[in-house]
C-alpha cells in the first residue's frame, strides 16, 4: 500500500464492537475510518480531538488490507509528542 505521509487527523467519535475499537475521523476534510484490535497491546482508545497520523514501518504492520498507522498526540506547540497506538486506516 502507498504511504499516507505524516498528516493531521481529527477523531470525531469512537465505539467498541466486541474485540475491536472503531473510530470515525476526518482526514483532509473527508470522512475516514480507523480501527484496532483490542487483542493488540498497542490498541488504545482515544478521545475526540486532533492527532498526528504517521505510517507504521514495514516491520510493525499487523493489519492487512489497510494502512497501518501510528497516532501521536501533539504537544503545546503543535509538534509531535507521544505515540498513542497502532491503528488500521481503511482506504
Image (cartoon, rainbow, N blue to C red):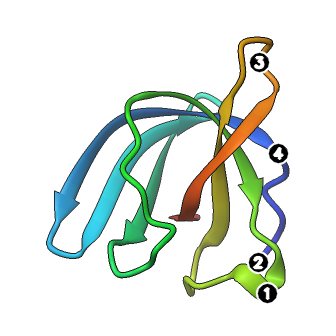
Q: Position of residue 61 (x, y in %)?
A: 68, 82
Query: For mark 2, what is the residue?
Result: 1
Please state which of residues 33 and 86 is positioned toward the viewer in this rendering.
86
For label 4, the crowd category at 10 Å Cα-Cα, with few meaning under 14, some 14 to 19 and many 20 or more, is some
For label 1, the crowd category at 10 Å Cα-Cα, with few meaning under 14, some 14 to 19 and many 20 or more, is few
Q: CA distance from mark 1 to mark 3?
A: 28 Å
First reached walking from the N terminus: tag 4 or tag 1: 4
- Circle on res. 47: none
Query: For mark 1, what is the residue?
Result: 59
Q: Residue at x 44, y 53 (%)?
A: 33
Q: Dot 2: what SS?
A: loop
Q: Are marks 2 and 1 in contact (CB under 8 Å)?
A: no
Q: Is residue 79 above or below residue 51?
A: above
First reached walking from the N terminus: tag 3 or tag 2: 2
- Circle on res. 78: 3
Q: Is residue 66 above or below residue 23?
A: below
First reached walking from the N terminus: tag 4 or tag 2: 2
Q: Are marks 4 and 1 in contact (CB under 8 Å)?
A: no
Quadrant of image for the N terminus? bottom right
Please indicate whether residue 2 sits to the left or right of residue 48 in the image: right
Looking at the image, is mark 3 or mark 4 nearer the viewer?
3
First reached walking from the N terminus: tag 1 or tag 3: 1
First reached walking from the N terminus: tag 2 or tag 1: 2
Q: Position of residue 16 (x, y in %)?
A: 19, 58
Q: Position of residue 38 (x, y in %)?
A: 32, 73
Please state which of residues 1 and 12 is positioned toward the viewer in this rendering.
12
For label 2, the crowd category at 10 Å Cα-Cα, with few meaning under 14, some 14 to 19 and many 20 or more, is few
Amino acid at each position: 500500500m502507498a504511504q499516507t505521509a505524516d498528516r493531521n487527523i481529527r477523531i470525531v467519535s469512537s465505539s467498541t464492537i466486541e474485540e475491536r475499537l472503531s473510530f470515525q475521523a476526518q482526514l483532509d476534510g473527508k470522512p475516514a475510518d480507523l480501527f484496532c484490535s483490542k487483542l493488540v497491546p498497542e490498541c488504545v482508545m482515544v478521545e475526540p480531538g486532533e492527532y498526528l497520523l504517521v505510517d507504521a514501518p514495514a516491520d510493525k504492520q499487523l493489519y492487512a488490507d489497510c494502512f497501518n498507522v501510528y497516532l501521536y498526540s501533539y504537544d503545546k506547540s503543535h509538534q509531535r509528542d507521544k505515540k498513542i497506538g497502532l491503528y488500521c486506516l481503511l482506504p
